[in-house]
Each structure stands twice: as C-alpha cells, then as structure tokens.
Amino acid sequence: MKVEVITTGTELLLGEILNTNFTYLAQELNARGFDVLYQTTVGDNPERLEDALKIAAARADIVITSGGLGPTRGDITKELVAKFCGAELYMNLEVWEHIHTLLSKRNICIAANNDKQAMVPSGAVVLRNEVGTAPGLVLEHDSTMFVMLPGPPFELKHVCEKELFPFFEQRFPQNGIIKSHTLKLYGIGESGVAELLDDLILQQSNPTIALYARHGEILVRLTAKAAAEEEADRMIAAMQEKVEAIVGTYVYGYDNDTLPEVLGKELLERQMTIAFAESCTGGLASSLMTDVPGSSEYLKGSVVSYTNEIKRDVIHVNKTILDKKGAVSEEVALEMARGVRELIGADFAASITGLAGPGGGTRKKPVGLVYIAVADENGEECRKFNFSGARSQVKHRAAMAAIGLALERVKKCSLNREDLEEISNDHDTDR
Amino acid sequence: MKVEVITTGTELLLGEILNTNFTYLAQELNARGFDVLYQTTVGDNPERLEDALKIAAARADIVITSGGLGPTRGDITKELVAKFCGAELYMNLEVWEHIHTLLSKRNICIAANNDKQAMVPSGAVVLRNEVGTAPGLVLEHDSTMFVMLPGPPFELKHVCEKELFPFFEQRFPQNGIIKSHTLKLYGIGESGVAELLDDLILQQSNPTIALYARHGEILVRLTAKAAAEEEADRMIAAMQEKVEAIVGTYVYGYDNDTLPEVLGKELLERQMTIAFAESCTGGLASSLMTDVPGSSEYLKGSVVSYTNEIKRDVIHVNKTILDKKGAVSEEVALEMARGVRELIGADFAASITGLAGPGGGTRKKPVGLVYIAVADENGEECRKFNFSGARSQVKHRAAMAAIGLALERVKKCSLNREDLEEISNDHDTDR
C-alpha cells in the first residue's frame, strides 16, 4: 500500500512550526506495514491543494491529508477532496450534535461557521474526534482512499489511535505488523553497548536491534515484523532475553519508563524518601523527580545550594573543606549529600556540584566537571563525571546522573519484609 | 519567485527525523521575499525523485533539494538533476582538492567514492561547503533554477549563509526583504492583548502584527516588508512605538530575551539577590533561573519544600497556619516567601505552592490552583492563579509566573545611587 501524506497550512510553509504530524504519521504507518513514499506540503490555497490531490491520487493508493478541517473560510480540504471524488456534502447530525455538546461544555458560543464542520461528504466514513470539533473522514474514489485528519497534533493523534488505525487493521488485515520494544539503559555509553551487542546486531535481521543515545541514556530498540501481534511479541521476547543476557545489568526500564519514575517506584516499594542538594543543576534534578505524579510520597524536599554561603550555612558543608578543596570537589559533594540528608531527614540524599559553563572553567577544573554523591544510613559514595555539551546539556546530564546513581544505591537496599516493617516504624516515630 | 523545496531521504519517510531543514529554509527564504509554495519529501529512489523534479520544475521558479549529495550509491540527487537539465558531469579540481584537504585533516582515508563528490554538472555554480565534502550546486535549465544543498543540517545552514543567500541577493536584488521583531509580554493573556491591539492590527498590513501565546508568555511579532533593511527597521521601530504606547507596561523584553534572563539583569543592576521556595514546581523555577550563565551572581539558593514537614522545619512555615489553611493557600505562600528569604539571606524571595495534578484536586482547591508570593524588606504580596494543562505545563506556567511576579517586584525597587551604596554595604556586612 503506497501512501502519500499531504500536510496543509501556511504556517508550515512559513517555517513557523515543524511538521511533527508527518513524522508521527510516518512512524505509525511504517510500523503498520504501509509504504510511506511521498509527503507534500501546500498552503491553504484551493488550486495548489487541488493539484496536489490530483498528483497524489495518481501515484499513491492512500492519500492522507492533515489540516484544513476547521470552521473558517480558509479551511478547504474537505470541500476539495469531496469535489475531487464527486461527492456532495450533507449535514451529519451525529457530528453536529457532538460539536454542539463539546462547545457548550467548554462554554463557547456556537458560531454559524461551526455548522460547516458538521458537513460530511456522502459515502464518507466518519472518524470520531472526541477532543475537537473536526472529525476525521475516509472517502474512497476509483482506486484511491482519501483520509482527512484534523491539523492540531493532539487531535490528529487521538483520531489516529482511536479510529483510523483500528479501521486500517480491519480494512488491510494482510498488511502484517511491525512492533517495537525499547530497552532503556543507564550507566554505560553508546559505544560500550555497541561493542557488547556487536555480534548479536550483525546476526539479526528480524527482529532488528537499533541503538540510540538520548540525554545520557541509551535506548536499545527491538523491532519485529510479523503477520500478527502475538508472533511479533514472541519474537521480541526471545530477542530481549538474548540482549539482557549481555547488558541486563544496565537496563533500568522499558519503552516509556523514565529514570525519575523508576527511582520513584523503587523508593515507594521500600517506603523510603530522598532529598537532593543541587549546585550546578540549580534544582533540575528535583524538578525532573517531581515531573512524576505522586512524587511527594518520596521526595521530601531539596536545597539548591547555589553559592558557597548556602552550602555552608544551610546544609552545613565544612568551611575548611570548602575553602581548601573548592566547591567543585569530591569532598564537598560528600558533605552536601550528608548535610542535606540530615537537614531534610530523608533516607537517601544525592548531591551535585560542578561547572555547567560556559565560563568558570580552569585547566584543573574544566567546564563539564561534575561530582555527584549519594548518602544513606550506611555512608556515602561519590563519582566524578566529565560531561560535554552546552550549559543546559551539562545540567541535564548531571541531573540524570544523580538520579541514576541514587537508583543504583537504592536498589542495593534490600526489600525484605522485616526491613519494610522497620522502615515503616521508623517513619512513624522519627518523622 | 515561487519556490519548491524537495527534501530527500528514507529517514524522513520513516519518521526517524523531523524535517528541520525545510523549516529552516522556509523561514530564511520567506524572510528574503521568496514565496515558498510547495515542499515535497521523497526517498532515495531514482524514479520517484525524477518525477518529483519534473513536477517541481513545472510549478516553481526555483527548486531547492536537500540531501543526496554524499559519496554512496544511494546519493543520486546531483546525477538526476544533471540528467534532467541535460548537463554532463565533470571532475571539478577545486572541489576535489577541498575534499582531499578536509579528509586528510580529519585523518580519514580517502575512498574512491569520495571522487564522486567532486563531480560537478557543467554550467553549475559551485556553493563552497567548508564544513563538509559535498558542495552545494546551482544549475539553471529553461526557466527553472535548481539549487542542490547537502543534507546534514549543519552543512546545509553553512552553505546557505555563506554562499546561497549572498548569491540570491545578487541574483534577485528586486526581491526586497522581510524583517521581524518580537516584543515579549508578560502578565497579560493572549485575548487581552488581542483586544487592546485590535484596532491597530486591523489597520495594519505592513508591518503586520501577529500574536502568539507560548509557555505563558505572549509574543507580539512585527513583520515589515521593504526594499532594504534600513527601511524595514524604520517601519518596525515606528510600529513598535505605537504598540508599546498601548501594551508597553507588559513588555519585558525582545526577540531572544527570556524572563529568567531579564529578572537576572534587573537583580544584577541593583546588586541584589533572590531565593525561591518551591512546592508544586519542585525546583523548576530555580532551574530556569540557573539556565542563564552567571546566575550564581544573584540566585543564592532555594529550597524545594515538597512536603509539609519541610515547609515547617526548614523554612519555618507556621504549623497552625499550615494545618488550618492547608499547604495550598495564600497564607502558606506568604510564610514560605518570608521563610526562605530569611533562611537564604536574600534580598528577594519568591514562593510557589499549588496543585500540579493530575490527582489531588478538590472542588474548593482544583488542579491548577497555584499561590505565588514574593517578599522583600518592605513586606510580601501574594497572587492566586488557575493554570490549565497537564502536570508539566502547570509546573512550567507556575514557575514562569513566579519569575514574572518577582520581576514586577524587583522593578519597583528604585535604582538610584544611594540605594546601590546602601545595598552594597549591606552585602559586605551581613553576608
């Protein structure tokens, strides 16, 4: 099945927005066995869009448009596709009702031009859009299937997932499926993983194994092509076993798991709490931790000790050490972790001190040098990192490294029942 | 001048990368008075690319390709464009020398297929590529100008800036230029700005006035079309004056200015310092402040008081108030600002307490309810916000609102010399 995607909108041609709709559609359609061969962008201009539809119909089996389904005069996609297919528009009462219900829920006055959105080409399949007023539409003409999708990315995704992809599955059962599963690794570099998995990657063609480095994490993506989902799942599970036999110790999660989420889960399971003392990351590690809903269950609090004075006066870093070793040092990192753990009264603490740049680096202490320490009731440990990149990248990598190091330390803490009870009592009495 | 951009590459059609090359070209070309009317993506397939070239040549004056100039067999753009134009390829010695110099500098062995990159269509203008091996090329045929650019974004930008755009300026002097200038507003919503500027927007066609809402800020973009840069600058300056006469009190900066940067500048000018007490933002406000290089000059430190216990024990929020009013309340916000200002010993303090969601909301205190307070030596003030959006959006909007409120308060603090001296002494003795 050859697919062409036509994205419409002047804002695309002006370079005001990136074409994320196409990237999404390309990923999803390729994964479902469609061949996405062409993508065209045109503005909200009737002649040019009409020409683009003609060209697409001549070279593709499925033509997918995004945008131009809104209530304004500039929204012309539906009208032009209907014209091309020789279909009349009629008022679809179900769509009309949905629009009216949605707008009144949002306390928006219904304008006359909203009725335009309830007009549907005769013979079209309506793809319900629960999160917006413009439904998706499927209209077939000669040997071409036209699929019209709303332009706002959130609505487009919603209509695809809830309506279009299930429709495709029924309509093109022979297509087979491609399924992916991602292993997320922490604590090892891309070249390290590549070396370890080299033989396996070369041997394999289905599932394929692909490596990606992102924000200091390594992603290992397994992609299987099969006739049915169960078969793809089996193939992926078998390959995952082989991969984890080699790099399993670095795997912290899968697919949409994030490092802050996994650390949170491990803390929750142990009913333990954490605190951060942040210098060069300026609060980013804590902010990443609190991106996870429910994180107040385990993140008690943090201190951004951005100046020496705060390191000394608030989290009680020893002044002599601070003067002698400098703020960016192993010794100060250890003191910070100890100090914030005590101040906040948390089970674990992690500290970050380093040089995010661009200024302030010296030969002995270059930009990107970061010390990260973790502390718990058994003591402290510190690790030294040299991160590359711009200020914001160094901040992000350092924050993730602190969360990663904390995860390592927390995992070492056993999870047996007695411990849990002890910890639980501890919570009741001490805090 | 009608322009079509053809981006090539299977990775685009698989959705593996976003088409940033097109967005860049669209922005730059529109700004130079070209009409970018079409964009097409095809894979590395000779027939499909040839067809795309034919279609483009028939509807555009300038056809710009990106990608397919590399040394491999899959790189076919140059060969196909030359074939389309009936031009022979010849070995260009200057390009050959450049490739050999560059590769030997990088200690890369020169492969036989690198010579392919030195082949140039006869009659083509060579656009030198100092940062890569594939030069850009301009080839004219009938009434169409073909511009071939390398695919790697960094190389494409380099060739455009250093070679293509100067070439265009000479070749199309009549094109004129488009220039934009953005006013950044804070403390007012999009509909508020729209209402205030309504008359002005309707009256104006050159410069145009466009409004955008982004991350809780409002952008007012003035875009002028003129024959020369100086004229555009004059037109924009005149319009800016009119706009600022109406909404000037909300303008905090221009173009690439950010709210944290501007707050930092105001604090630096006054030689004053700030601290944050963050609850629902979990450190994000401090992190945004420390994204600015040199922020350690004015951000002394912050406390993420994520639990009631930390609010009470570390920044000394009154227990009775906390119990009676709840953590998300005006009273607690005020206590937090006061408390953290004292703990950190800063001139200003801002506090944030609210419900980021998705859980935890009640009818009286819904998700998105956030109290933000600021404190200085003259006292405190608090404002109540109701933010919409997902957890991360509420966090971001709340953090920006705190920075905005702090900026308002800091600006009220006069900047006369006596004050500066007093503050300066204060710094020396107290801290």
Image (cartoon, coloured by chain):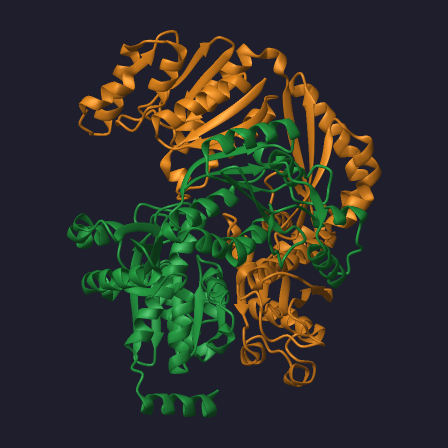
Chain colours: A green, B orange
Residue at x 84%, y 37% (from the top left corner): B199
| Residue A106 location, quadrant | bottom right
Residue at x 45%, y 68% (from the top left corner): A312
Q: Is residue A420 left or right of residue A48?
A: left
Q: Nearer the viewer, residue B71 or A400?
A: B71
Percent across and percent down for residue B337 are 64, 68
Q: Is residue A368 left or right of residue B368?
A: left
Residue at x 58%, y 77% (from the top left corner): B311
Q: How many marks?
A: 0
- In the picture, the quarter occupied by the N terminus of chain A is top left
Percent across and percent down for residue B79 are 33, 18
Residue at x 73%, y 25% (from the top left corner): B235
Q: Is residue B404 left or right of residue B283?
A: right
Which residue occupies the extreme right position in the image?
B199
Q: Nearer the viewer, residue A255 or A167?
A: A167
Q: Is residue B149 visible?
A: no
